[in-house]
Structures are given as C-alpha cells and as structure tokens.
Amino acid sequence: MNKNFKNKNKGFTLIELLAVIVILAVIALIAVPQILNILSSARKSAAESSALSIAKSADKYVQDFMMKNYGGFPEETVTFECSKEGCKLQTELTDYNITKLEQLGFQGAKPTGGTVTITEGGNKVTASNLEINGYYCNYDGEKSWCETEYIEPKFGGTVIKKEEFSSKGIVGGYEGVLAIIYLDPTDLTKECNEKNSVSITGTNTGCMKWYVYKDDGTNYTMISDHNITDTIAWNSTDGESTTNYNGPKEVLNALSTATSNWSEKLVAPTPYTASWTYSGTSHTYTINYSTYGNKARLISAEEVAEITGASKTTENNGIGWTLSDKWFYLDGAESEDEIWQTPVGSSSKKSKYAWLFNNTEDCTYYGCNVAQSGNSGYWTSSASASYSAGAWYVDYYGTLDYSNADLYDSLVFDAYYYGVRPVITVNKSDLLQ
C-alpha cells in the first residue's frame, strides 16, 4: 500500500476533537450570557421607553382635556386601567366633556396590565406596574424604570410605625401611638410626607399629620394633630337653659362641613351613644354619623381614658374612670397614685401624650411638642354626667376636662375656646402600602 496515500487520509485524533469541543464550550460560556444580557437589556430599554411614552401621552391627555373643558381639570385622582386594548379611563367625570377622551392615545407596544394616574389637578402623572415585554414598568413623574417582578404600588402618604420612632429620632410624647401617618383625607393616594403636610388650625384639605392609636388588623383609626375648625360651641341650640342632653349639635355640623369633600374610601364611623344620670334623671343621646356624611367622627372621652390608661385604674371604687368622674392629667392616668399629677410647668419636660394636645395655645408649658394660638383644645363627643351644661374636652393643660358650674367660660354653649379635631378610620388596603 502506498505510504503517501495513508498519510493523506489521516484524521483528527480523539484528543484533538475533545480539545476543540472544550474551546467551543468555553467560548459559548463567555459569549452566550453576554448575548443574552444584551438582548435582555435591549428588551428592558424598549419597555422603559414604552412606559415613558405612555406617561407622556397622559400629559398630552391633560392638554386635550383642558382644551375641551375651558381650561379645567379635576382635582381628584384620574385613573386609567391598562390592558391589551389600551389604557382606558376608570374615573367617573360626569361634570366634564370627555368625548374622545375615554382612553390614552399613544404609539408603540400596548401594556397588558397596570395603571396610569393623573393627580394634583393635572400637574402630576404616575404609572404603576405597566406590563410590557415581560417587565413591570413604573413612572414616578420624572423617570421610568422596569423590573422583572410586580412592585407593590407606592403608598400615597408616609407611614412611620412605632418601631421606627427611635431610629428616626422621634422619641417622647408618643405613648399610645402605633404609627404616624402623613395623609390627605381628600385623596388617599396622594404622596404626603412631613415636609408637605400642614398642621395649621382650620386646615382640612391637603396633606395632614395623623396619629394612629388603634389597629384592628384591617383598619387604622387615627386622630389629626390639629383642629380643622375654629373654636365653636358644643351645643347652643337648646334655648336659654342650654344643656348637654341632645349631644354636640354645633360641633357635628362643623365637622360635617369641614369634611364634606373627604374621600369616600374612609371607613364609615359607627354610632356613638352616651348614657348617664344627672340629678336622678337618666339621659341618653346617640350620634349617628351617617347623617353627617360618614367622613369622620369625634374622639370620645372614654377613648381618651382608655388611651391614657385611666379606664384601667382602681380608683373610683374599683370601676375605673367613667363620665361622672373628675378630670385628670393625661400623664397621671397610668396608675392609681398618679391620676392627680400637677402641671408639668416646664417646657423642657414633654408629656407622653403630647400628641393628644399638640397645636393648642401655650401647651408647651404643660408638655406638648408644639403650640399654636387661637384655640385652647378640642371637644369630645361625650357629655359630662356631673353638670347639665358640661361636656368633655382635651385642653392645653394636657388634661381631659369638662365644663361645670364653676367654669363659666367653657360651657357647652361657649364658642370661644374649643374646636373640632377629627378621627378617621382607613382601610389598610386603601392606603396602597
């Protein structure tokens, strides 16, 4: 056999083939992830661009809307739900012309899910979890970004829970508070924080500061840090011999007016009934808050006693504090021998319950954190059982007190000292946290 013929037909050895395979595998290990990353990055960038385009179409929507409605745009949140058919308007706008404004108009990929919202009278657009190219995309008013997983919608306000107080430097004056919430009661989705919240007496719209004192697992119950009305009589409509027998008429009317435009998502308050005996005669009244708009309610004297621990003392023949008992300092209600604590008398010492009487006149002398002129405190929903023209109130002394025959300047028909401080209940799911 010809030797040259043999040499010409010689093939690769097994070792050589294995070497080639190894080299190709190494190249694949290096190149494939990079290629996939490039493709993924391109897909993500395209999704972000689409999300930005959708957000910009909402800006255009505002312009078109105002052109058709003489320059007007709703102050309430305007929401669009997105699907493969586009982003359709969900908010009922019966007072406006919305012809050909039923959905957003934009070019490019349509999201298969997510929401777009327009707030602040058309000045702010946000988008949440727009499903584009397998991503969940968001827009915060300035930039868009996409993630591979669904992102819980951002809470409109800011919640600072009790366990965070110390880490945030909030210490003292918060006994009984479960959380501090910055919230706009007219729009629960509005972004609120410490900087844009207002605590001025009479402020009843926009971002406000609230103290949560009850959490039933589903709802937060909270009280404002300031009065939302000027001073007002508790009840001056029963004639010359005004009594507390029919409840806080003026206060409830003022509460209704001040909260008339608050969110319908607020949990409707339950009725409150006061029952007591005065001079041998039984009296009772029930506040049915549904007749006042179901927006907010008043804190009761019993709740204040419960918050501060007065209802658990063994004073008063072992039955705890009741509507017939004497007033007490809020800090002195936590134990039997401290229920009659003298005034703090120094602005350097803070009350543990400062949050209950903050923003009242000269209250820093009695331990509050911040004072505000113009009001001495706020009325509760509770009548006094010790005097027919008396009702319970929280005042700048840091007390739960009631007007009586010896205090002619704070009777139920007196409109010069106390105002309205609302309590609201909010379903946690409506906070979008």
Image (cartoon, helix red, strand yellow):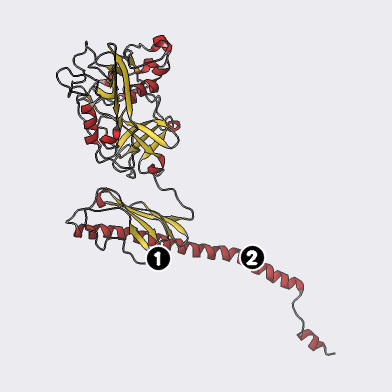
Residue that extends furthest to the right in the rendered view of this protein: 1
Q: Is residue 302 above or below residue 90?
A: above
Which of the two residues, 305 or 365, is positioned nearer the viewer here? 305
Q: Amino acid at mark 1?
A: Ala
* Disc with the residue nearer the chain's start (1 vs 2): 2
Question: Quarter of the image holding residue 209?
Answer: top left
Q: Which residue is mark 2?
A: 26
Question: Quarter of the image holding residue 202?
Answer: top left
3D distance between C-alphas at marks 1 and 2: 37 Å
Residue 231 placement (x, y as % from top left) = 20, 26
Q: Which residue is rendered at x = 36% and y = 16% of the image?
A: 322
User: Does dot 1 land on a helix, a strand or a loop?
Assistant: loop
Q: Amino acid at mark 2?
A: Val
Q: Is residue 342 above or below residue 69?
A: above
Count of marks, rendered view:
2
Q: Which residue is mark 1?
A: 109
Q: Nearer the viewer, mark 1 or mark 2?
A: 1
Q: Please tell me the numbered disc located at residue 17.
A: none
Residue 201 in view here: no
On-image quarter of the N terminus = bottom right
Residue that extends furthest to the front in the rendered view of this protein: 281
Which of the two residues, 294 or 203, is positioned nearer the viewer here? 294
Q: Which residue is rendered at x = 26% and y = 35% of the image?
A: 291
Question: Quarter of the image holding residue 144?
Answer: bottom left
- Looking at the image, residue 336 sits to the left or right of residue 77; the answer is right
User: Given contact means CB atoms under 8 Å apart, are the residues at marks 1 and 2 in contact?
Assistant: no
User: Does dot 2 land on a helix, a strand or a loop?
Assistant: helix
